[in-house]
Amino acid sequence: MPVFTVDVGTTPKRILSVNPKRIAFMIINDSGYDVYVGFNKDVSTSGVNKGVVIAANGGCWAYEYHKGELWAVASGSAEITIVESTEGE
């Protein structure tokens, strides 16, 4: 089960690529800034494209069966941890 960290800033960044074998993933935000996650590059911290909020200082979000891309943007410089479960592990 891969575990990795990703730096996220104030510009949307792809944090997961398409993976047809993905079963689930979990994102943990230990930074001091909120992180917003969405399913396309238009994710933002506010407005119509506001992503799912992963709160600062330990917020967590888990999701099953999404095999497409995942994008994130933060309200400041943040490092997140991603755990990804795939078929055959």
Image (cartoon, rainbow, N blue to C red):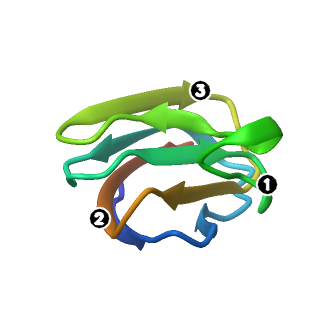
Q: Is residue 74 above or below residue 67?
A: below
Looking at the image, which residue is at 56% across and 42% down? 87
CA neighbours of label 3 inside 10 A, class few (<14), some (14 to 19), many (20+) = few
Count of picture labels: 3
Q: Earlier in the sequence, mark 3 or mark 1?
A: 1
Q: Is residue 65 above or below residue 36?
A: above
Is residue 54 in view? Answer: yes
Q: Kindly identify which residue carries mark 2.
A: 79
Residue type, label 1: Asn
Q: Kindly identify which residue carries mark 1.
A: 40
Is residue 88 in view? Answer: no
Front residue of 16 and 20: 16
Tag 1–tag 2 contact (CB < 8 Å): no
Front residue of 19 and 42: 42
* Cα separation between marks 3 and 1: 17 Å
| 7 lies left or right of 18 | left
Q: Kindly identify which residue carries mark 3.
A: 64
Residue type, label 3: Glu
Secondary structure at badge 1 equals: loop
- Which label sits in the foreground, 3 or 2? 2
Looking at the image, which residue is at 53% across and 45% down? 36
